[in-house]
Image: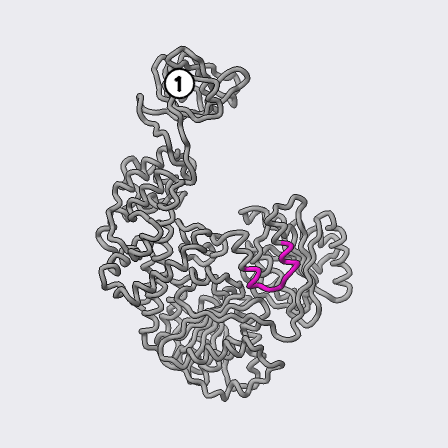
Amino acid sequence: MRPDILNPLFAEVTALKGVGPGLAKPLDKLGLHRVVDVAFHLPTGFIDRVPRDELDMADAGRTIAITLTPVDYKISASQRGPTRVHAIDARGNYVSLIYFGGSSGWVKKLLPLNEPKRVSGKLEMYGQELQIVHPDLGDGDEGFREREAIYPLSEGLTSRRLGQFVHEAIERAPDLPEWIEPGVKAKHQWPAWRDALARAHADPSDTKARERLAYDELFANQLAFMLVRASSRARRGRALAGDGRLRDMLKLPYAPTGAQARTIREIEGDLAQSAPMLRLLQGDVGSGKTLVATMALLIAVEAGAQGAFLAPTEILARQHFETLQRTLAGLPVNVAVLTGRDKGRVRESTLMGLADGSIDILIGTHAIFQEAVGYKDLGLVVVDEQHRFGVAQRLLLQGKGSAPHLLAMTATPIPRTLTLAQYGEMDVSRLDEMPPGRQPIQTNVVGEDRLADVVEGIGRHLDSGGQAYWVCPLVEESENSDLAAAEARAAALQSRFGNRIGLVHGRMKPAEKDAVMACFASGELGVLVATTVIEVGVDVPNATLIVIEHADRFGLAQLHQLRGRVGRGSGRSICLLIRGEALSETSRARLALMKDTNDGFRIAEEDLRLRGAGEMLGTRQSGEQGFRIATPEQLSELLPIANDDARLLIDRDGGLDGPRGQAARTALYLFERDAGVQLLRSG
């Protein structure tokens, strides 16, 4: 239960004075549904106003606050033209107040003639005249602070109005007991929590106040992870000790790499414990994660338990199913697949096989964890493409069976800082070497003026029996424009190469998408034109060429993921990055690094440096709440300190039961990091 002291902050936003249904809408667009959301909506900058008694040309370019009296209106003949209000100061100096859009009647109501008004705005010279465009109006002689915060806004809100709501939200904020270790707080000279909140809004350049709030958020995050981990370790699952009989029967075409062997040993050690395994396996594209997962699943089956393998998409689930069937051919292991597409008798038969234990390993999408799916004895869950599943989803998976072991895998190399921020409750294994025979992908950067040459090259590639991907640019934050770009490129290539060109995009139904992908995998199609839906996992060994159009618009991690679609066979693969004309320094550095290295971990660290952690955390994909206060820079700097402080609380300061622990419990609820702990306790 949330502590009562926080109730005023978790009230609906309509509890704030002046917020009715009309203003709740623009606040809702900003994600400000409750008082606490308003309190944590920090300003991005501030306006410094110069109070003046009279107008002065020397103030042009400054924001001033002054009392003016409207004396005349000049209304434009054109509907689109501005309404001008001529006004004078106390000395009779003239200024034009200009309003664009809206009716002149509205302006006349705002500024009645011969009534003095307190006005604020940027004073500008227009020819020889002074003007202020869309000035703010105060009440009487009051109403303007010399320094005023600027907030991220949506239509229907002004910074001043939002500032008033913030002021009220801070008034409702209680004084909270201190959760930071006193030595840490003193060393960084941080203010108390409520004081920090007020200061961060009053002066956006107050770094100590902002740092304190960011630290609190990171501390709550790390503490939640540690509690989840401790709680998970305390649960009694079952030890899975495999006897090796199934693994010995495997006929592998090559010996596992040192990294694979090491990781399999770590997993085997975890599975042999009764505390459920929580391990994250990071491995670059092609580093052999599937083999490690297969070995883990076989250990579970050797120990008499069932394994479940969760993939993010239907096509990947079926691909994993086919791979596993090939790998395990000849072994007495029953593998089945279950996706949302399976209906009727097929589905019923699979559900019965799971319930009576005749199915050893089930592969599928989220469908494998629906209420109706019951296992006889689920011992291990493997999650592929971990970044698609947040902490809450990870914990729900463990609700099936009696606390099964969990192995999460990602092909997105994650910098160490972010691993701590996202997967703090998990042990981490890294596959940092490639299996033998994998050739590095040759990466070339070409200008868009050479597009015709690229198309010629595609023709030669097709004639020699090769297949290729063509990835279309991210146009903007709109699926429609991405789709239009992909359709136009597919049409242009079809006019040249006919029906050997296929198209996949995010708007297609899964079955349609799967059908096109299947045609490409079988070799019916020579070129697959795609938006970034092919980023994860599709495996076509004969595709040895990928063209990425406007590569400068993609992030490094995404480029690396896309490049990983090729290089899956033994032949030499090529990645062509087509760049736009005007490149920023960051884009230039990204493309140079892609050309320079195939090492995903190096790319990930560099991506963090170039682009910051906000995007990389992938909170949009995982459905997980990200950090709303901590910036990427603060994340790198403060997270290790927050992690140590959280560990100190649990190891030395009595956990959540001591005085500091009680305060920390409040922080967990304040920053809404309590959900994972609640889930795990009830699981």
Q: Is residue 203 above or below residue 528?
A: above
Q: Amino acid at mark 1?
A: Lys
Secondary structure under the numbered disc 1 in the rendered image = helix
Where on the picture, by quarter, is residue 602?
bottom right
Instruction: Kindly identify which residue carries mark 1.
Output: 108
In the rendering, at what x and y percent does residue 547 appear? 67, 57
Apparent side of residue 434 relative to residue 159 in the rendered image (left or right) = right
Where on the picture, by quarter, is residue 277?
bottom left
In the rendering, at what x and y percent does residue 346 appear? 48, 74
Residue toward you, 388 or 576? 576
Can residue 372 be seen in the rendering of this structure?
Answer: yes
Q: State the residue at coordinates (75%, 67%).
A: 465
Is 597 one of the magenta-colored residues?
A: yes
Is 336 one of the magenta-colored residues?
A: no
* Crowd class of label 1 (few under 14; some 14 to 19; many from 20; radius 10 Å): some
Task: Count up the numbered dots.
Answer: 1
In the rendering, at what x and y percent does residue 501 appear? 69, 58
Q: State the residue at coordinates (23%, 64%).
A: 657
Apparent side of residue 66 relative to residue 666 in the rendered image (left or right) = right
Farthest-out residue, top: 92
In the rendering, at what x and y percent does residue 578 appear? 68, 52
Q: Is residue 156 above or below residue 646?
A: above
Quadrant containing the C terminus is bottom left
Residue toward you, 73 or 590? 590
Q: Which residues are magenta?
A: 591-604
Q: Is residue 115 above or below residue 302?
A: above
Can residue 486 be seen in the rendering of this structure?
Answer: no
Q: State the residue at coordinates (29%, 56%).
A: 182
Residue toward you, 145 or 548? 145
